Amino acid sequence: SQQGEEDPQALSIQEGENATMNCSYKTSINNLQWYRQNSGRGLVHLILIRSNEREKHSGRLRVTLDTSKKSSSLLITASRAADTASYFCATDAWIQGAQKLVFGQGTRLTINP
Amino acid sequence: EAGVTQFPSHSVIEKGQTVTLRCDPISGHDNLYWYRRVMGKEIKFLLHFVKESKQDESGMPNNRFLAERTGGTYSTLKVQPAELEDSGVYFCASSQDFRRGRNTGELFFGEGSRLTVL
């Protein structure tokens, strides 16, 4: 089973609308990070939220973290065509005695002009 | 400042052949990671170097995979012999951390090496 699982797997919205993606995880974490991958490119770090934080903003991005529910959400406001990409959450946690960053399957976001 | 660079960007080989992927991390980054994404599935951890030492190689699929980081600079990941299920995108990432063996911050990723095994 995966540490991080994104929901939905795919999301298609109109430009200008808000996009919300969710992530659930299983173990205690040090922090949770969101990354973006444009088609055929590498992953780009978007935002990091620590386990003692509940909400964080960066430009049009808003991330929430609920450690009691082991879940996080990424909100992109006023979406643009350039936001089309895959978004991954990654949990920084101790897994089998080692600290590592564990990714989920990602959410494929499509912004329609 | 140069980012993480990976070579080749795409490699097509036949089953049974050998492929070596290379990663040059950001200069000064002690932590170097290899990840793999197969067929749209999750991005899976393979291993973690701290300088030249393998800190965690629990994600390496089997002994057909060999990773090295001689001198603590660039790293190579060799697959020998390659199998069909090895196809995917191999990502390298690096980070700078002041506490040996611990990653508590963001990773800087390369653009990946796409491997296709026919």
Image (tube, rainbow, N blue to C red):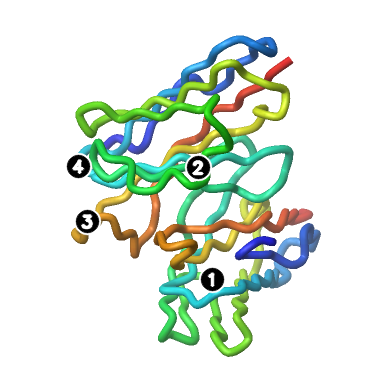
Q: Is residue A36 above or below residue B65?
A: below
Pointer 1 and pointer 2 on the same chain? no
Chain letter for mark 1: A
Can you tell which of label 1 and label 3 is closer to the viewer? 3
Q: Secondary structure at mark 3?
A: loop
Residue at image position (38%, 58%) is: B106
Can you tell which of label 2 and label 4 is closer to the viewer? 2
Q: Is residue B23 above or below residue B37?
A: above
Mark 2 is on which residue type? Leu
Look at the image and tell me in which quarter the C terminus of chain A lies: bottom right
Q: Secondary structure at mark 1?
A: strand
Q: Secondary structure at mark 2?
A: strand
Q: CA distance from mark 1 to mark 3?
A: 31 Å
Residue at image position (74%, 67%) is: A7
Q: CA distance from mark 1 to mark 2?
A: 30 Å
Give the image location of residue A92, x and y in percent. Answer: 45, 65
Q: CA distance from mark 2 to mark 3?
A: 19 Å
Give the image location of residue B29, x and y in percent. Answer: 25, 44
Residue at image position (41%, 77%) is: A50
Residue position for label 4: B28
Mark 3 is on which residue type? Arg
Q: CA distance from mark 3 to mark 4?
A: 13 Å
Residue position for label 2: B46
For residue B57, side relative to residue A60 (left or right): left
Say the numbered circle drawn on residue B100.
3
Mark 1 is on which residue type? Leu
Q: Are marks 2 and 4 in contact (CB under 8 Å)?
A: no
Residue position for label 1: A61
Residue A18's image quarter?
Answer: bottom right
